[in-house]
């Protein structure tokens, strides 16, 4: 399989904004599912019988961006039983991350800890954390990879470890039906917004101490997209699935949702 060189083929590299190392080359491993493979189909938040490989199968119609209608009313309760890890390596359930009766929580599911766009988004989340804190909203950032990968981002960006979590098996991503696939990751039109001057400048700033070591050992994980969710207790108020790499929810919209909900 031909490699994808960041110098010659990756749209993030330009004459004026060179954010990739000059020698960076991405070689898609053979286990990557491509756009028309069964693994690139949508999943839903409704649980079904686990498959023989230990990954649950989820099926649903297309989920609209910023819509909760495709999720079952009990999705908050189901998500609560998903186990992830703190950046320090301790196991924790989602339901233990915020008050499950009336607590407000913004759950940002990043792609993987080695994603360039996720370093940029994590930087934006960090800058917004004080604003959410002052409104009594818990900010939770989850990324794909082991806790040691999460610590690389936390230490180098830096990012507060007390609100950073690792989901190495992508359990929450599967449960919430977030997009997955080669086309979504590298060629989706929604990623075009990344090429604006302001986004490229923000990315280059966020990546000053970037390390490829933050990339998950399971390279198939780099094809996973993220999303943004807002909960009040167990109730899902807002759900947005990233259409492609760098297609993040506007935080001002998220903040407005949190503020207009009665405490």
Image: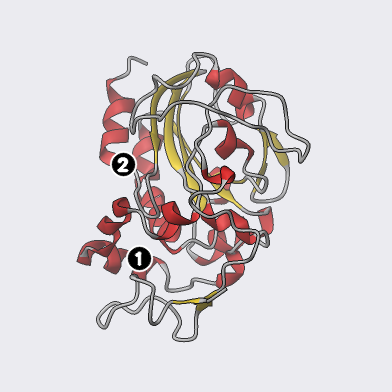
Residue 208 visible from this viewpoint: yes
> From what the image shows, is residue 47 above or below residue 150?
above
Q: Position of residue 136 (x, y in %)?
A: 41, 28
Identify the residue at image location x=38%, y=81%. Answer: 8
Label 2: few (<14), some (14–19) or many (≥20) C-alpha neighbours in 10 Å: some
Vertical side of 207 occupied by 25: above or below = below
Residue displayed at 47% across by 42% down: 179
Q: Is residue 112 visible?
A: no
| Distance CA(mark 2)–CA(mark 1) | 16 Å
| Rendered residue at 29%/77% (across/down) | 17
> What residue sits right under mark 2 in the picture?
251
Measuring 37% from the left and 16% from the top, which residue is drawn there?
A: 263
Residue bearing mark 1? 203
How many numbered tags mark residues here?
A: 2
Residue 102 versus residue 258 in the image, above or below = above
Is mark 2 in CB contact (under 8 Å) with mark 1? no
Crowding near the residue tagged with mark 1, few <14, some 14–19, many ≥20 C-alpha atoms within 10 Å:
many
Secondary structure beneath label 1: helix
Pinpoint residue 73: horizontal percent, then vertical percent.
49, 13
Percent across and percent down for residue 29 are 62, 66
Residue 218 relative to residue 223: left or right: right
- Mark 2 or mark 1, earlier in chain: 1
In this orientation, which residue lies closer to the viewer: 95 or 128? 95
């Amino acid at each position: 399989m031909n490699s994808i060189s960041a110098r010659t083929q990756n749209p993030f590299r330009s004459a004026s904004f060179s954010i990739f190392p000059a020698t960076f080359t991405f070689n898609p491993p053979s286990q990557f599912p491509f756009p028309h493979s069964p693994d690139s189909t949508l999943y839903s938040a409704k649980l079904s019988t686990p498959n023989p490989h230990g990954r649950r199968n989820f099926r649903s119609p297309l989920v609209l961006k910023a819509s909760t209608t495709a999720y079952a009313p009990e999705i908050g309760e189901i998500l609560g039983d998903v186990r992830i890890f703190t950046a320090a390596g301790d196991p924790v359930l989602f339901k233990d991350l915020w008050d499950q009766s009336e607590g407000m929580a913004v759950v940002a599911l990043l792609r993987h800890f080695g994603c360039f766009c996720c370093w940029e988004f994590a930087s934006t989340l960090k800058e917004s954390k004080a604003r959410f804190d002052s409104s009594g909203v818990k900010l939770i950032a989850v990324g794909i990879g082991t806790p040691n990968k999460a610590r690389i981002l936390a230490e180098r960006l830096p990012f507060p470890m007390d609100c950073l979590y690792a989901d190495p098996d992508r359990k929450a991503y599967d449960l919430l039906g977030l997009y997955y696939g080669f086309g979504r990751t590298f060629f989706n039109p929604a990623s075009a917004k990344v090429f604006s001057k302001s986004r490229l400048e923000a990315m280059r700033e966020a990546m000053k101490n970037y390390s490829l070591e933050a990339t998950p050992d399971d390279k198939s994980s780099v094809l996973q997209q993220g999303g943004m969710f807002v909960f009040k207790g167990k109730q899902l108020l807002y759900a947005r699935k990233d259409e492609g790499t760098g297609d993040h929810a506007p935080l001002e919209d998220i903040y407005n949702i949190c503020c207009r909900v009665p405490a």
